Image (spheres, rainbow, N blue to C red):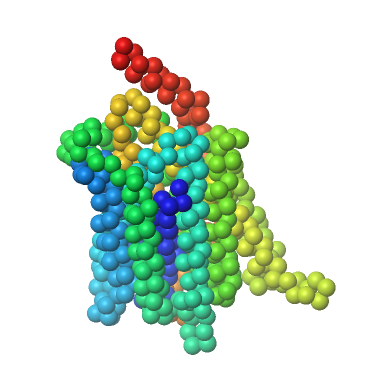
Amino acid sequence: MIGYSIGECANSIIMNSLFGYAMLYYTDALGLTHADAGIAMALAVFWDAITDPVMGHVTDNTRNRFGRRHPFMLLGGLAVIATYVFLWHVPAVFTANMELLFWYLVVINLLQRTAITVFYVPYVALGFEICTEYRGRVTLQGIRSAMNMLANVLGPGLAWVIFFSNNSVSRATSVPDNYTSMGLAFATISLLCILTVLVVTRKYIKDSRQMKTEGNTIGGFIRDMREILADPYPRYVFAFIVVVTIGIALVSSLQMYLYEHFMRFGGIEKTITHSGSMVGFGIGSLLATLLAKKFDKKGGVYFGGFLSIGCNVVLAIFFLPGFLTPGQTVVLFSVTIPLAYIVFTFFHALYWTGNGIVIPTATSMMADVSEINELKTGINKDGAYAAVFSFSQKVAISVAVLITGYTLTFVGFEPGREVVQSPETLWRLCAATLLAGPAVALISLTLIRFYPVNDKLIADLRRENESSRAMDQI
């Protein structure tokens, strides 16, 4: 499980650096408007989303001596690294003109997202196949999610002090060379992770030339999508993951502006706070197995959802009315304690702990419904189910990124280097960050309540399938 999850480290470093720093890079360092930056990123994520189901169908129906997953993971992984470098190293000819810069970012993001699809969809499908036990799936997805956060802490989290330490000349996030250095370092580490997971999981390569498939045809793809969308079991998981991911991605994008402009954290403070959120998510991911065992999977999702909602609401109560202000301290026994910083960092980490419970549990739910389909049809479509699940997440992220750009414009943020934002703008930013997530998460929890799958249902369907096969043999 750990060896497989190393592949998630590459995904984490690449995706979390994009979510955490790309909007800052395009606006603060390169001068693009927030709305244009949001559009450029949203188009790429949406393209990534619509190509996922195609990739799922292709990987499920590939006949190859090296299996259905590993060839795509290798080719896609190498392409991911190549395109990632040029997301942060923008040629000077494009930075001199904002229109050219916009279209450069659109094209390079589209190429990069295509490469991610080719690598990530087969990678997730491979995880569905490695572990087939009901609660074991939560454990696998929890470990993968925890590895994601570990890589996030050691990569994008530490980037604040390694690449973006504040200095007396200018704000570090306004210097393009800092992002270029970060991109080269993260590309090297991610490449090593991709090569490692290919070697570690090679024993799961199965010659697919004789496997039962429907063939890589347009008609087969349409049948796959129609079947999955008509399947009642994953319907509520899809709806839930779309809504909850919009809330999570919106907070994830806005929180960087909150660290930098509202809370006015220094490099070390940002590293601790950002890393604390990742540690919280990782702890939540590891707790997901225990909660699924105690409350089943739907109960675990409720627990995580209400934890994240409650923590952001508490922060809103502290900071929006002014009970706490950024930088506020208290003196206790002659020791100055950064009260506002401690309160924010603690509840912010707990917010992400709740999300850490929710995401791997929902992913394991999709593995469950894929198995139910296989029990009924006799055809393994883990790739297609993983792809449609990924499609749902990425559509949500695309929407959230687009909303982020317009939210920053709406609250009054001005793009450019060394721009000082007004107090009213910063208050509106804080309100949008702390209240949008809980509102969206609450809506998502009303959707998952209709999800019908549990441990007993899976066990009953397995027994029915075994009985049917026994009768067929007789």
Q: Which quarter of the figure is the C terminus placed in?
A: top left
Q: Position of residue 26 (x, y in %)?
A: 37, 71
Above or below, 219 relative to 421: above
Q: Is residue 155 visible?
A: yes
Q: Residue at x 62, y 49 (%)?
A: 310
Q: Residue at x 24, y 41 (%)?
A: 207
- Residue drawn at x 54%, y 54% is 282
Q: For this rendering, which residue is in front, 364 or 222?
A: 364
Classify 48 as above or below 305. Answer: below
Residue 94 position, x and y percent, is 26, 76
> Across the whole image, how many numbered discs are drawn on residues?
0
Identity of the residue drawn at 44% across and 73% down = 414
Q: Is residue 177 left or right of residue 448?
A: left
**Of the pair 13 and 306, the residue shown nearer to us:** 13
Residue 15 visible, this angle = no
Q: Nearer the viewer, residue 143 or 202?
A: 202
Residue 303: x and y, percent? 59, 42
Question: Camera-side residue: 148 or 444?
Answer: 148
Quarter of image, res 75: bottom left
The part of the image, by quadrant, that contains residue 402 is bottom left
